């Protein structure tokens, strides 16, 4: 069975915290698919996910949200991504 793991980043290009998130994580965790959505361009979609601050990261495994992280704390984001990448359902 193919296990699809997504890290969805809801961000805004004008937001300094959003720009501070390091792209190195994409290269390190090749088993994850990283998607970024601009909350300004996709406001209705962002609202459907109840995004109220940027950056917000939604972690999805096999179509189910398994975690959510709001903020630009690089160390905490790395920890969450590593946790999701290592978890087995």
Image (cartoon, helix red, strand yellow):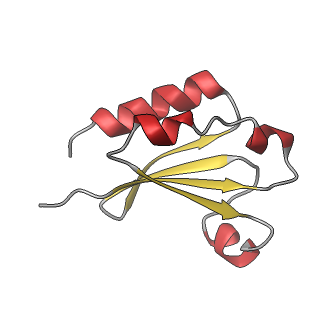
User: Residue at (69%, 58%) from the top-left corner?
Assistant: 51
Residue 74: x percent and y percent? 63, 27
Q: Residue furthest top?
A: 75
The residue positioned 88% from the left and 52% from the top of the image is 14
Looking at the rendering, which quadrant does residue 43 occupy? bottom right
Nearer to me, 64 or 18: 18
Image quadrant where residue 46 sits: bottom right
42, 52: nearer the viewer? 42
Residue at far bottom of view = 44
Residue 4 in the image: x percent, y percent? 30, 58
17 on left or right of 60:
right
What's the residue at 81%, 55% (across, down)?
13
Q: Is residue 32 above or below residue 85?
A: below
- Residue 22: where, in percent of width, then height? 64, 35
Whole-percent x, y for residue 70 in the image: 66, 41
Q: Is residue 2 above or below residue 66?
A: below
Q: How many marks?
A: 0
Could you tell whether 17 is left or right of 82 in the image?
right
Seen at 72% across and 64% down, the residue is: 38
Image quadrant occupied by the N terminus: bottom left
Horizontally, is 64 left or right of 67 in the view?
left
């Amino acid at each position: 069975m193919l296990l699809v793991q997504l890290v969805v980043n809801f961000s805004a290009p004008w937001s300094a915290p959003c720009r501070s998130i390091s792209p190195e994580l994409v290269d390190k965790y090749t088993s994850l698919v990283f998607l970024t959505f601009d909350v300004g361009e996709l406001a209705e979609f962002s609202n459907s996910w109840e995004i109220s601050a940027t950056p917000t990261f939604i972690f999805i495994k096999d179509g189910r949200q398994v975690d959510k992280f709001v903020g630009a704390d690089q160390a905490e984001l790395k920890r969450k991504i590593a946790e999701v990448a290592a978890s087995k359902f």
